[in-house]
Amino acid sequence: MHYGYLNGTVRPVDELNIGITDLSLLRGYGLFDYFLTYNGRPFQWDWYWERFQNSAAGLRLPLPMSKDETYAVVMDLIGRAGGADVAFRFVLTGGYSADSISIGQPNLLIMTEDIHPVPGVQYEAGIRVMLDEYVRDMAEIKSTDYKRVILKALDIRAAGASDLLYHKDGEISELSRSNFFLVKGNTLVTPNRHILRGITRRTVIELAKPDFVVHERPVLLSELQDADEAFTTSSTKRVLPIVQVGDLTIGDGQVGPKSRFLLQRFDELVAKW
Amino acid sequence: MHYGYLNGTVRPVDELNIGITDLSLLRGYGLFDYFLTYNGRPFQWDWYWERFQNSAAGLRLPLPMSKDETYAVVMDLIGRAGGADVAFRFVLTGGYSADSISIGQPNLLIMTEDIHPVPGVQYEAGIRVMLDEYVRDMAEIKSTDYKRVILKALDIRAAGASDLLYHKDGEISELSRSNFFLVKGNTLVTPNRHILRGITRRTVIELAKPDFVVHERPVLLSELQDADEAFTTSSTKRVLPIVQVGDLTIGDGQVGPKSRFLLQRFDELVAKW
């Protein structure tokens, strides 16, 4: 069973409630973060905490707890989750609003969830993604705004695709919930603007450095044409190969050796986390 | 005291809670509507209900109640509110999500709130608005996404302004929570795309028809230069004159006779509602 923490109370997730005047409900004013545990320990805790702090500052919401206090809650919830590794979701909201528009005292929610692993076949065959001409507003803040991809879920499935790749003015930014990389020879290229800076992205860049040249820079849609490989990174997806973008086949349409290599390096890291 | 309705339960607003796995909280997936009562009756109920239905269809959320059932709830809540006219807020959410991303059974919240009238001085002196280069994603759906204006509230106040006027590629769309009109002679011009179609906007267009030519069409920023007057419309603002946009003074910087006339027509309509 999963437990959650809300403003000092710990209860089973399905018994936790929030008042209806919270600004996340009324005005979509909230941010979140999401990470996994490996071997019972939060993965890259320092980096996630840093990002959570940055998102909170970006939405001008003061954090109600220190890093150490929050870590104690995390470890308590891990203890209650029963032994298996879990996903953590943090949500920080604009709080209860007296006039339905002004920010109140932020509500902090911390909960565990089951990990929903990507089916193994997607690592073997790679995924297809649909192009979507869009750029997330305030992409660098991990806000709760996911209307677009939820609304398009049916279209994505109907197209036999797994996700959206956002682009605007000929420039690629990110997938709906993950980052994007191209491989060309021994070079990795990944967008550096209009994106959420993923922790898995950062981890993969670190892991790649001994063997690759890594360029973080604006990436053009046209660069897809002569890429050898492409992949996406997120907590849940790790290093997930992309073999088709819209109508365009990436490389030879097969999962490539560089993507496999980086996935293997990532799995080695988390195995001994 | 204000009461709210949530999925069959009616309680005081501050005793109503929603589970933390609701998609409005986790993913900003929700829509709302907002209207006032005059003389104890919901203003333009048919039009609000039609828009609420359209927003729900736009986010692919089935409505859990019929129009008549909803109206009965509205009248019940009016009865509980103690006699004064009230504001109504409807919120329809993506529901409780098993995996934090897939839509569930929508939760419908209906609540009354105090009306927060615009200070009378703003009708006498007019308001200033800041320009903001932005266009709302899915503006035609009354989604709960108001991060941008909440985040900019401090900047707006610091600039001595009351609101943001959104524009993109030289074209005006709307204010953060209200529609926009220009007056030139006996012509009213109001944007017809990238906007939420306001019920007050619709009402004012109807009221204006005997005395004005009304053009609903794309409106350029450059048209501000030689406008006689400008105003904004919303449930709460009614017909609120705008005398300055960014650094530009509209007309002679005073509230103009056409804006006053339309406000008066509006007030006459609601007085006998």
Image (tube, coloured by chain):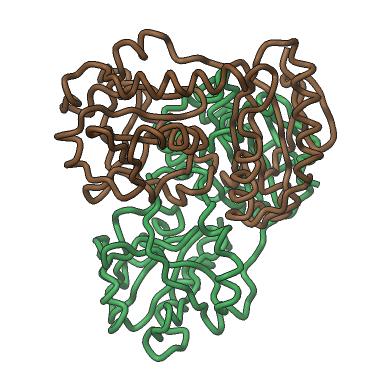
Chain colours: A green, B brown
Residue sitting at the far bottom: A252
For residue A151, above or below residue A56 = below
- Is any atom of residue B199 visible in this view? yes
Relative image position of residue B204 (x, y in whole percent): 45, 32
Residue located 57% across and 61% down the image? A236
- Whole-percent x, y for residue B195 in the image: 42, 45
Q: Which residue is outermost to the front?
A: B210
In this view of the protein, which residue sits in the foreground, B237 or A107?
A: B237
**Front position in the image: B103 or A53:** B103
Q: Determine the residue located farthest toward the right in the rendered image.
A: B8
Q: Give the position of the C terminus of chain B as an image quadrant.
A: top right
Residue positioned 54% across, 39% down in the render: B144
Residue B140 in the image: state x and y as whole percent. Answer: 48, 49
Q: How many circles with numbers are drawn on the protein? A: 0
Residue A85 seen: no
Residue closer to the observer: A195 or B146: B146
What residue lies at 23% left-to-right and 32% top-to-bottom?
Answer: B185
Quarter location, residue B228:
top left
Point out the image quarter for the N terminus of chain B.
top right
Q: Nearer the viewer, residue B173 or A85?
A: B173
Q: Is residue B178 above or below residue B136?
A: above
Above or below: residue A153 compared with residue A88: below
In the displayed structure image, the side of residue B248 where residue B132 appears, left or right: right
At a point 62% along the width and 28% down the height, the residue shown is B43
x and y, in percent, of residue A147 in the image:
54, 52
